[in-house]
Image (cartoon, grey):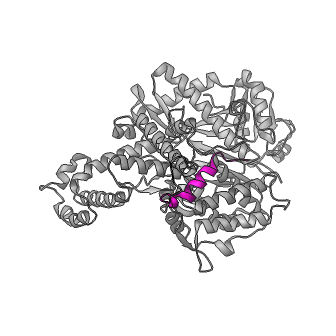
Amino acid sequence: MERLMGVETEYAVNAQGQYDAESNREQQLWLFMDLARREQPYLRDFGPGMFLENGARFYVDCGSHPEFSTPECADPWEVVRYILAGEEMLSGLAAKFNAGEGEDALTFFKCNVDYSGAGTTWGCHESYLHRMNPEKLSAEIIPHLVSRIIYTGAGGFDSLSSGLSFTLSPRVPHLGKVVSEHSTHERGLFHTKDESLSSGGFHRLHLICGESLCSQTAMWLKVATTALVVAMAEAGVRFSEVVGLRAPLTALKGFAFNTECKAEALVVNGKWMTAIEIQRFYLERAEKHLRASFMPAWAKEACREWRLMLERLDKGPEAVKTTLDWAIKLALYKDYARRQGFDWQQLPHWTYVHNSLRSALQIANYDEKSISIESVVGPGSPILYEVERLEPYLRKHGLSWGGLSQFLQLRRQLLEIDTRFGQLGGKGIFAELSRQGVLAHEIEGIDDISAAMKRPPAAGRARLRGQTVKRFAYDRENYECDWQGVWDRRNGLVLDLSDPFTNVEKWLRLDDKKEDRYAIIPDGLRERIRYLEEGRYYYY
Amino acid sequence: MRFLQRDRDEREAQQQPQQQTPEAAPGSNLNELRLAGEEFLAAGFDAISKSLSGDSEAFLASTKQQGGQ
C-alpha cells in the first residue's frame, strides 16, 4: 500500500560580525531569504516562505530560524534524500551569503537544543498520512515513540542542567506531556495537531518528539519504523495491550539517560521491559504482517534493517559507535574529556556539585554570572555552608575544588562541540568524519542529492507541485502555492492538490458556483480563497 | 540495502572482550579493528579541535534563540 510521509527540520543560526546581536538576527535572515528568492525558482506560499521546484517548502519559522520541509515522500529513502537536498541548498545559499558578508557571517546547524541557557529547542517534525482515528493511534504508537530513541536519538547534553548530563535524546527534557496540542511549550510525545492538509478522509500524524539527525541510518530507520507502526495500527494491529507503558514520560527519561540501553520500564501487564524489548515486539508484529496488503512494498527491507539494528544495540553502544548520532557523540565526547584530563564517570559528580552550588546561589539571591567560581568556593563564599557540605562528597569521589573551573571549561567546550557536530556547509564535525570515511552511517540508495534539489518525487502531488513551480516561477507575481494547491490569481484558477496521491493536473475555476467550489476545496483553504477574492494578498 | 562498514563495528564490539587473548597479535584482524577504532577517535579529536572557536561561551551566546518548536 502506498504511504506518504515527510519531515520538517528547524536549523539553528549563529551570526557573527555585524549581525551577531540577537536582535539583528531576524533582519539577517530576511536578507538571507532575499538571496534565496534571487537564487531559487519558487512560488510564494501564503506566508513569507517559498515552495521550491522539488516540491519542498523553505521558510523562516517562528523564533527566526530557517526551516525546510521535504515534499511528500513515498518511502524512507526519499525522505532522507530530500532532507539532504534541503541542507545542500541551505549550505550553498549560506556560502553565497557569506561571500558577500564575511566568512562565518551566517552559519546553520542541525542541532536540537540551545545551550546558551535560553531553554530553546529546535524541532524536527515528522508527518505520516493515515486514515485511522487519531485518538486511537496515540495509545498504539506511544510505546514506539518512547523506545525508538535508542536509534533515533541525536545524542547530546541535557540543556536544562547546569552540568554535563549526556543523553541519547536532548529533546527529551523538553517534553512535558504524553499527549499535547502545543508545539512551543508543554510539548507532547504525541501531538494532537491533526491538520490533514488534504481531502479524502486522510489524517496527518504530526510528531514533534523526534530530533534532527546526521546519520543517514538513523534518519532512515526513524521514518521507516514509524511509518510501519502507523500502517499496522491503521489496519487494526494492536500493541498497547502488551507494551502500553504505565508511565510513558518516566520511561522516556529512563531510556534517554541510559547509554547501555538496559533501562527498563513498566508496561501494562506488570512486566518490566527495555527499549530494545519493546522495539523487538513492534518489529515482530511487523514481520508477522509483512505480506499483508496494508504494508508498504519496502516493509521487508525495513524489517531486516530494524532487526539488525536491535541486534547491534543489544551489544551496547560500542557496536553502533560509528553509525548512530548519539553513539558517535558518546565515543567522541568521552575521548575528548579523557584528553582534557577528565574521566567520563566523574562528570555526574561534577554535575551534582555545580548544580548544588548554582541552586544555593539562587537561594542566596546571587547572580552566578556576577561572581567568580574562585569566590564561590573560597573562604569568603556567600554560600560557605553549601561549599562545606559538598566537601566530603568531593573527597569521596576523588575530586577537589581546584578541578571545578576546568570542569566548567570542559562543559563550555563540549556544548560548543555538540552544537558544531551538525554544522552545515562541510565544516561540521560529523561532515568531516563522514568525508574521511571513518563513519558507517550511509545507506545505499540515498544518492543523486543534486537532482533532488531540482526534481520533485516521482509520485503523488509533490510531483505536480514541483513541476508547476518550475513552470510558473518566471511569472510568480501571479501565483501562490500551498500544500493543497497552486493559485493562479490572474486567471482565477487553482490547481487542486488536495488529493495527496493525485497525479493528474486539474485546474479548477475559482468563479464557479460558490457551493461547488467549496465542495472541492478543503476546509483549510477557504480562508485563503477569501484572501484571494478580497484582494488581500501578501507581498514579500 | 547495505549499511557500509557495519560488519566492522559488529566485529569490533564482539571481539573487544577478547583483546587480551594471544590471538591479538600485531597484524591480526583484531589489531586492524583496534587501529580502525583509534583512527576514528583521532579523526574525531582532530575535527573537534579544528571546529572549536576558542571562546565557547561567546559562541554559545551568539547561537541563543528565544523561539523554536
What residue span does the magenta drawing correspond to?
B1-21
Along the line of sight, the residue nearer the viewer: A77 or A36? A77
The answer to which quarter of the image holds residue A133 is: bottom right
Q: Main secondary structure of the magenta part?
A: helix
Up/down of A259 relative to B40, above or below: below
Q: Camera-side residue: A260 or A76?
A: A260
Q: Position of residue A364 (x, y in %)?
A: 22, 59
Residue visible at 45% across and 24% down in the picture: A103
Query: Looking at the picture, how far across and down is residue A525, in whole percent?
Result: 73, 43
Q: Position of residue A43 (x, y in %)?
A: 70, 29
Given the current orientation, which residue lies at the most extreme bottom position? A270
- Residue at x 64% of width, y 57% of height: A309
Residue B42 shown left or right of residue A196 in the figure: left
| Residue A366 part of the magenta-drawn span | no
Residue at 43% x, 35% y: name it: B51
Q: In terms of depth relative to the viewer, which is nearer, B64 or A61? A: B64
